Amino acid sequence: MTQNFSNSFPNIRMRRIRQSKWIRNLIEENTISSNDMIWPIFLNEGSNVKEEIDTMPGVFRYSVDNLNEIVDIAEKQKINLVALFPSTPEQVKSEDGAEALNPDNLVCKALRHLKSQNLNFGLMCDVALDPYTNHGHDGLIDNNEILNDETIESLVKQSLLLAQNGADVIAPSDMMDGRIGAIRNALEAEKYKNTILVSYSAKYASSFYSPFRDAVGSKKKLKSDKKSYQMNIFNSDEALREISLDISEGADAVIVKPGIAYLDIIHRIKSKFQFPTFAYHVSGEYSLIKSAAQKGIIDENLAVLEHFAAFKRAGADAIISYYAPKISEIIKLI
Ligand code: PBG
């Protein structure tokens, strides 16, 4: 009898491992679950507010007294981390974004309200000035220049205020140089040694943030682009340099943002640094899927599942997504 040990068809039939669900399950290389999810939510002043964001159907701004709805969903869906983003009233925005340092600003009020409850999830807050500046930039500005070192002084104060009010995770999203080290030193000096620092290290100057800027009311304000501090969409080595700096300055995890257009960056970070890496499925990625689904062009949950699967294949540990509360519906499709 002749034996055929060849490494080709018909010895190898790839479809054998795809023929039924049980074998597909066993062969599956990556998984997603609620363990992976971080849910961004938007805050509004006032009481009893739950208002839908025009460019992000299905996503709402909540007043602090209505946040219990968020707590219930996050607990039910077993989400691990909720990120708070304020939509600051126009009249308190200013050139220097001083409202960022007001202990009674929207984020601080929300932190205190949420922290008074026994939550099973963590709270994350962005550090950057754009929700508070009347020009919509993330930093202090002088003659159209975004000032690096002066901005860091504000970001350090903003970080300490957030830590003091109960933020478990501080996430600088401003892209100033040296801010991670400065914030880490200040947190250590003030004995906030357990505050987790998750850096938006590879944040690209992207068109996909547009609905978010509507949500926090900074879009109309922003006259120029953010290319002098956010990354050039054509670069990837530069992202690795950013990551290596933030790791050495004391970051606990890093974020790649946006997600789907930057899977190569996630993969390179994981290969080179083996460091906790989060993918931000940003507002524009949410709205693209949502609007195509509303027109009946694609199946919403399947499209989201595919995006999340891509993040996991690329090596992301966690995913920041407006779809986080839909996680149980989405994983039913696996
Ligand atoms: C603020 C910030 C932005 C996002 C998160 N934090 C917008 C920006 O940098 O202009 C975008 C998130 C999203 O689009 O979902 N620095």
Image (spheres, rainbow, N blue to C red):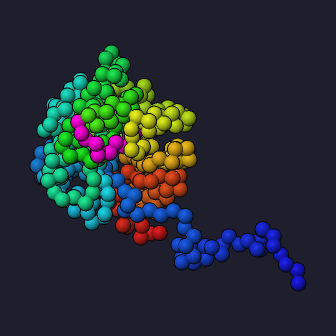
Percent across and percent down for residue 218 are 29, 34
Residue drawn at point x = 38 percent, y = 61 percent: 35
Residue visible at 78% across and 68% down?
8
Q: In the rendered view, does 117 fall on the left or right side of 10?
A: left
Taking the view exactly as shown, the residue that stands out farthest to the top is 143
User: Magenta segment, which residues?
Assistant: 190-204
Q: Residue furthest left?
A: 47
Q: Position of residue 57 (x, y in %)?
A: 31, 52
Q: Residue 202 placed where, x, y %?
A: 45, 38
Question: Between residues 326 and 183, which one lies in front from this camera angle?
Answer: 183
The answer to whether residue 222 is magenta is no
Q: Quadrant of residue 77?
A: bottom left
Q: How many marks?
A: 0
Q: Residue furthest bottom?
A: 1
Instruction: From this view, report whether residue 251 is shown above or below residue 21.
Output: above
Q: Residue at x 88, y 84 (%)?
A: 1
For residue 13, above or below residue 271: below
In front of the other: 291 or 86: 86
Indicate yes or no whether the magenta region holds residue 203.
Answer: yes
Left or right: residue 233 compared with residue 250? right
- 143 lies above or below 218: above
Q: Nearer the viewer, residue 47 or 119?
A: 119
State the residue at coordinates (15%, 44%).
109
Q: Compared to 196, does 332 lie above or below?
A: below
Q: Can the viewer see residue 225 in this picture? A: no
State whether residue 238 appears in this view: yes
Q: Position of residue 296 (x, y in %)?
A: 43, 60
